[in-house]
Image (cartoon, rainbow, N blue to C red):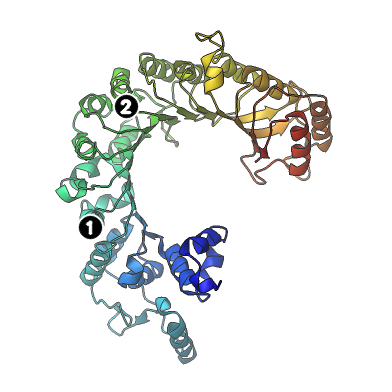
Amino acid sequence: MSSSVWPREIWVNICRFLPPLALQHLYEVNHIFFELAMEQRYRQISLAYLTQSMLKTLLRLQDPEIAKRVKILHLHPHFVRDILEKDALPIVPAATMRNKIYDMAKNITDPGSLKFLRRKDGACRSRSLSFRTSKDLMKIVLDVLGNLPSLEEYHIMWCGEGLSSINTAPVPFVLTAFTPTIRKLSLDVSMDKLQSLFCSSSALDLPQLESLDLSVRVDPIWEQQLSSDSERSLSVTEGDSFEPIMKLIANHRDTLRNLSLSSREPLDWAPLFFSLPCITFLQTLSLSVPACAPHFGDPSGLSFFLNSHGPTLRSLKLRVTQLSGGGIPVADEEHLDSWISAALSQVDLPLLRHLDITSSLIPTNAAVRCIRRFTNSLHTLAFTGRTLPFSDIERVMFEFDEPGLTGVPRALWSLRCLRLGTVTLSPQLFDLVSSRMPYLERLELLVKEVVPSQGDCAIYYQEPADMQDESQIAQFFDEMEKRSFPKWNIKTLGLLRNTAPFRLEPQSKYWEILHRCIPSLIALI
């Protein structure tokens, strides 16, 4: 069969295994490779600062055949400030005749590489993109952003002191890119920008929106807080309205499936939680709670919101975030522990299947209580973000021991996937997990170090740095060869690292030893 008549799906599957840069160099193979290479090259674009790279991108996106390939847009409206404040455009230095001839030849083979040439009046020009003033360039940017017919993900970052001088000038640029095809919207914005951003009804009409990631900041208020040396906690309640957020979520309550709410500064979100209507089909909720009091405000607000979505919520991700720098209040771990416990103690999520707790700032006691609350329904549990001593892992295992109606703890056979890290890998860790969770099918461990026996200290060489003593790893293998876990149902085992190399080496040796002592093991990742 000729390759020209192969189904497109076959070529797409082949290209999945090719690095993006390699794929871009295969556009001459056939028309399918050309289409796939073009889609890969222009699938995701970013517009941030007014540079020659951005001007070149604008030039290319004026072609409808290229604009239709853009699926993901990252917009950081710093270029608006560059245009308004400088009112001057980046200019390529005058080229020599030799370079001009080279550029002409290159433009024939790659029209997307057209150079901007210097005019006597100081403006920039090209064969397709020409402008004399900043107003002309603004019009070009608006035209490009308003003609992305296939856009599916839109990521907006509009915050920080650097953009305070231009007030609401970026609003038209941000709103222009909103199209009915958007499925995911990510907003990282200051509280003071929300009202101006969503005063337009067009921004609230996204009929296919399924995922909303919202990160709210209060930069100006935080700066005043630091300069005034006032109390340690910052709470924004009055004067800052959550009404734009409420309208955005309420208008898409029937299409949203995934919702993420995040704030690094402590904010009183309770009024929003109480006033939001039920999101009809919400399945995944991600919460990034500020480490400093009052966190998300009244914990009963979050409890009310979670219970309202108990009939549909299947995945919950919990994190704790904190700003860093001089003058930033220090998080009170005891207060945070009490707040998390109060927020989750009365929550009932009968369909919750996936729980992900990832943060070094979440107190261990709070994390364990959270796990305890949902053990009976969980299929997947991830507890990562901090170094977990053996005693903490034991506490997590014990939370799944409550007997069910048949005498066998229901949680033992309902939990199928467990991810822990970082941990010290030892034979005793395998003993613990295999005995406490015999029905587990997938185990992923983020490994910090390997020791032959629990309680041993890892020994590292000085040169090369961070390389563990090989004799300890050899002793670990010796101890594991003495063990057998015939009743353990584990199918997939992951032994991963947070730094390169991301797998434990030698991988073949780990597979040989573990496959021998765990007969059910199919894959080591």
Residue situated in front as seen by the camera: 310 or 242: 310
Above or below: residue 122 compared with residue 377:
below
The residue tagged 2 is 230
Which image quarter: residue 296? Answer: top left
Residue situated in front as seen by the camera: 391 or 398: 398
Residue found 56% across the figure and 18% down from its top: 412
**Quick check: can you spot residue 26?**
no
Q: Where residue 309 sits: x, y (%)?
A: 31, 26
Say which element carries label 1: helix
The residue tagged 1 is 176
Identify which amino acid the numbered label 1 is placed on: Thr
Residue found 46% across the figure and 63% down from its top: 40
Above or below: residue 98 compared with residue 292:
below
Which image quarter: residue 504? Answer: top right
How busy is the neighbourhood of tag 1: few (under 14 within 10 Å), some, or many (20 plus)?
A: some
Which image quarter: residue 503? Answer: top right
Question: What is the tally of numbered marks visible in this picture?
Answer: 2
What is the spatial separation of the Cα atoms under label 1 and label 2, in whole angstroms? Answer: 40 Å
Q: Where residue 84 sits: x, y (%)?
A: 25, 63
Q: Quadrant of the C terminus?
A: top right
* Front position among marks 1 and 2: 1
Residue found 67% across the figure and 39% down from its top: 524
Q: Quadrant of the N terminus?
A: bottom right
Q: Where residue 393 sits: x, y (%)?
A: 61, 20
